[in-house]
Image (cartoon, rainbow, N blue to C red):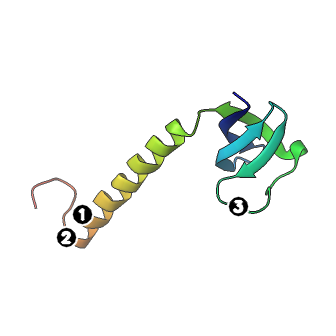
């Protein structure tokens, strides 16, 4: 494979999923961004995940946020008893 899909974690804790690394050396794109929003010296770690783990986490987080918003808007105390 000529490229890897990874999540880049910066030293300050920011994460950039769907980062394309070509030839094991060059970051060619980051998500849908037109520019690379970090420098090589900013990188703390690179997690090769082929875009899958982050996607699953994103949907789980989105579903959790929607559930919490629904519970808050319904006036429930979170006990499940209404």
* 67 to the left or right of 65: left
Q: Position of residue 52 (x, y in %)?
A: 51, 37
In the image, residue 22 lies at what x, y percent? 78, 37
Could you tell me which secondary element the residue under label 1 belongs to?
A: helix
Q: Give the image quarter of residue 78.
A: bottom left
The residue labelled by disc 3 is 33
Residue 62 placement, left or right of 44: left
Q: Which residue is mark 2?
A: 74
Task: Tell me which residue sits at (51%, 36%) in the image.
Answer: 53
Contact between marks 1 and 2 (CB within 8 A): the answer is yes
Q: Earlier in the sequence, mark 2 or mark 3?
A: 3
Q: Toward which corner of the image does residue 4 lie, by quadrant? A: top right
User: Is 71 rendered above or below residue 26?
Assistant: below
Is residue 66 positioned above or below 50 on the image?
below
Cα distance between the residues tagged 3 and 1: 34 Å
- What residue do we see at 20% from left, 70% from top? 75
> Mark 3 or mark 1: which is in front?
3
* Inter-mark Cα distance, 2 to 3: 37 Å
* Residue positioned 71% across, 43% down in the render: 20
Judge the density around disc 1: few (<14), some (14-19), many (≥20) Cα neighbours within 10 Å: some
Distance (Cα) linking label 1 and label 2: 5 Å
Between tags 2 and 3, which lies in front?
3
Disc 3 element: loop
Q: Is residue 23 above or below residue 69?
A: above
Q: Which residue is mark 1?
A: 71
Relative side of 60 to 23, left or right: left
Q: Position of residue 38 (x, y in %)?
A: 82, 53
Image quadrant holding the N terminus, namely: top right
């Amino acid at each position: 494979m000529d490229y890897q899909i990874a999540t880049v974690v910066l030293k300050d804790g920011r994460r950039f999923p769907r980062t394309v690394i070509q030839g094991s050396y060059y970051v060619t794109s980051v998500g849908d961004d037109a520019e690379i929003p970090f420098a090589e010296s900013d990188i703390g770690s690179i997690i090769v995940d082929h875009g899958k783990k982050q996607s699953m986490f994103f949907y789980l987080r989105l579903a959790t946020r929607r559930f919490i918003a629904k519970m808050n808007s319904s006036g429930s105390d979170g006990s499940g008893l209404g």
